[in-house]
Amino acid sequence: MKERIAQLKKEKNAVIMAHYYVPGEVQEIADYVGDSFALAKSAKNSDADIIVFCGVSFMGESAKILCPDKKVLMPDLTADCAMAHMVAPGKIAAMREQYEDLAVVCYINSTAELKCQSDVCVTSSNAVKIVRELPNQNIFFIPDRNLGRYVAEQVPEKNVILNDGCCPIHAELKAEQLLAAKAAHPEALVLSHPECEKEILDLSDYIGSTAGIINFAKKSEAKEFIICTEDGVAWQLQTDNPDKKFFFPEPSLCCKDMKRNTLERILAVLETEENEVEADPDRSKGALLPLDRMLELGK
Ligand code: 13P
Ligand code: SF4
């Protein structure tokens, strides 16, 4: 299967982009593996004719918006991010009425419809930097209340208004589970994604995006780590650091949508060129502005 995928990629000038949460065997054959920010940049800079995007729908959609001339295929078009839809209709307009200088800051984990109504997109690796640099005093952060709260703590000079959305996967993780993992591995450093609840972040030694967690573990002199994010990151962590140990609080977090990206489905879309991501032209135009602004401010 891997040989056939490699052959088709060559024949069709296709590349495979994969998020750190997809199955390890998919990360292994991908041309680019990264966090949401790195993948958006790679899509924008790619000179391939076809991008097979192994992630969830907001990622494929963002890639299509950033490079409308390319064919973007997803191994499974039903792979979605529940959080991407979690802003109540009319909420953004209501906030804009209430605050004159409001900036709507939209986590990239959102639909194009939400991006269209926003001033700038962010990912977990650049949200603090971008919010700090915005000229606006009032920030409406959508959809993730956990990343929003973390940003508000890092940028206390701004008034960050939170929206009641969250990642249902990360929100599952409770302090007792992490405390049990810490008790079992007292020497381990705790590395957490900012989509986790405050009770987890308060117990963490490092907070960052998936790429941030992976880079931290690689550079650290510590030998043991407890990882508070989706278990797909284990593949890169273990590949980079065969001499280090990584533990996940039990039960580990698993995003079933990310796991829909299988080798079988990649091969099928490369063969048939089905599952093409379609983006509504008006919506794409509207969503491109905040995405481009993110790429500029996030540099
Ligand atoms: P990253 O931006 O850290 O890759 O996170 C994406 C995501 O979906 C986290 O749940
Ligand atoms: Fe969305 Fe959470 Fe899955 Fe990330 S882990 S894609 S935020 S549902």
Image: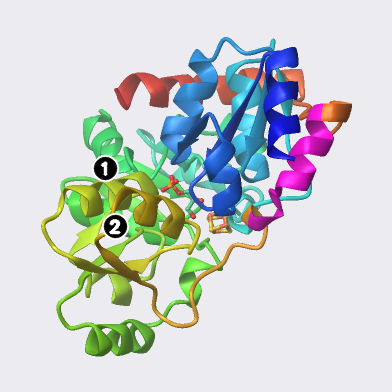
Q: Quadrant of the C terminus?
A: top left
Q: Residue at x 69, y 51 (%)?
A: 80
Using the image, tell me which numbered label, if any, was put on residue 128: 1
- Residue 291 among those drawn in magenta: no
Which secondary structure type mostly characterizes the magenta part of the structure?
Answer: helix
| Residue annotated with mark 2 | 150
Q: Quadrant of residue 215?
A: top left
* Residue 193 appears in the rendering: yes
Q: Nearer the viewer, residue 33 or 255?
A: 33
Furthest residue to the front? 3
Residue at 57% across, 32% down: 17
Read off the magenta span.
259-270
Q: Are marks 2 and 1 in contact (CB under 8 Å)?
A: yes
Q: Sequence order check: which comes first, mark 2 or mark 1?
A: 1
Give the image quarter of residue 16: top right
Q: Quadrant of the N terminus?
A: top right
165 and 184: which is toward the camera: 184
| Alpha carbon distance from label 2 to label 1 | 8 Å
Image coordinates for residue 228, horizontal then vertical, percent: 37, 68
- The amino acid pointed to by label 2 is Tyr
Residue at 25%, 68% (x, y): give it.
225
Rendering coords of residue 46 (x, y %): 54, 15
Left or right relative to 147: residue 280: right
Query: Where residue 70 sits in the image (x, y, percent)?
Result: 69, 14
Tell me how the rendering is colored: rainbow
